[in-house]
Image: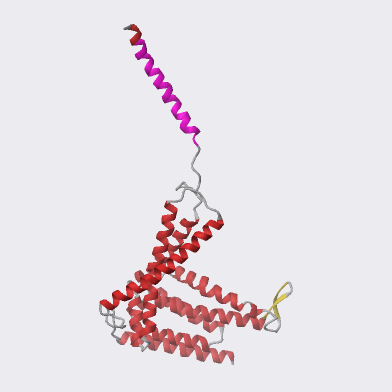
Amino acid sequence: MPKRDDRRSARPQRSSRIQASTPATAISMPAPCDCCSTGGSSRSFARRAADAIGKSVSEMLAGEETASKKGLLQGIDPRAKLAAIAILAVTSSFVHSPIALGALYALGVALAAASRVRLGSLARKVWLSAGLFSAIIALPAATSFVTPGPALVVVGPVAFTKPGALGAITLVMRVIASANFALLIALTTRWTDILRGLSALKVPDVFTMILGMAHRYSVSLLRIVQQIHLAKESRTIAEFSASEERRWVAGQMAFAIKKSVKMSGDVYDAMLSRGYSGEVRSLNSLRAGARDYAFLATIAAFCLAIIAWSRGAMA
């Protein structure tokens, strides 16, 4: 019996040795790599792509939220806003003064502020897309190789002339003013109202149908591609080489094309089975009032004044 008690008293000592060795074993295990950890600073290609796609979808859907706010342009009839865009586009093509084009851009900014549109987001979208693209196109025209004249700035063998710089600035400002108005109307008007306004202005139904389906497909396909990237991220435990990532992206692009073709057929069949006739319908009735006519008249008068001032200044 004493020996059995000794054995029992020895068992806790052996278990304490095992317990004492367990933390040392856990500490000696290798830490997970950065690609497997969720809190690491580095992110995989799939995660970065999914985040970028999600941001794009959020920006596309933010227009509906802005259009539902109470502002100046939100209360204007879509037909009046589309007609105003046409007037402003024609005006920007007739104006050749950067100051006059700057006045048109300032008008768009004032309308955006009155419509409760975030000015920072609007300026970033306009300048980083249309502004940057037009600047890249207009930059060679500002050099002496294309537009001769007195040199304004000389950078090595390249000289930027005064007439060339004036023409480049005019082109960039014209594109910026037009893109600012177009994006402003898109942000302050529901997509269905834009399509119905186009139909009311006698735009062909095929064109409006293509625009409507393209808008819906872009959102749906972006969501599908985002889910594909998130699925890859959740099932990946090691990094792949650049060639393997390119092969995977190429395969997913082919899958997205097949998915879009199948989805287009299914959606069109569903639309026909529900009585679709090609006419765009909206829950909001389009009724032009005195406020809409006053808005359109104000835009037209402002544009006429800008054209008259620009021609007088250029003369």
Q: Nearer the viewer, residue 227 or 78?
A: 227
Q: Position of residue 269 (x, y in %)?
A: 31, 75
Q: Position of residue 135 (x, y in %)?
A: 58, 75
In the foreground, 173 or 26? 26
Q: Above or below — where is 35 with respect to 27?
A: below
Residue 8 shown in magenta? yes
Q: Quick check: can you spot residue 114?
A: no
Tell me where residue 78 sits by quadrant: bottom left
How far across and how far down the image is residue 101, in percent? 52, 82
- 167 relative to 223, above or below: below
Residue at the image point whose x is 55% and y is 54% from the top: 241
Q: Nearer the viewer, residue 27 or 289?
A: 27
Q: Tell me the quadrant of the picture where the C terminus can be found.
A: bottom right
Q: Residue furthest right?
A: 157
* Colour pattern: secondary structure
Q: Position of residue 220 (x, y in %)?
A: 37, 67
Q: Magenta residues, as a range?
A: 5-29
Q: Is residue 19 above or below residue 197?
A: above
Residue 219 against residue 245 in the figure, above or below: below
- Residue found 47% across the figure and 85% down from its top: 89
Q: Main secondary structure of the magenta part?
A: helix
Picture residue at 65% right of the left edge, 82% below the top: 164
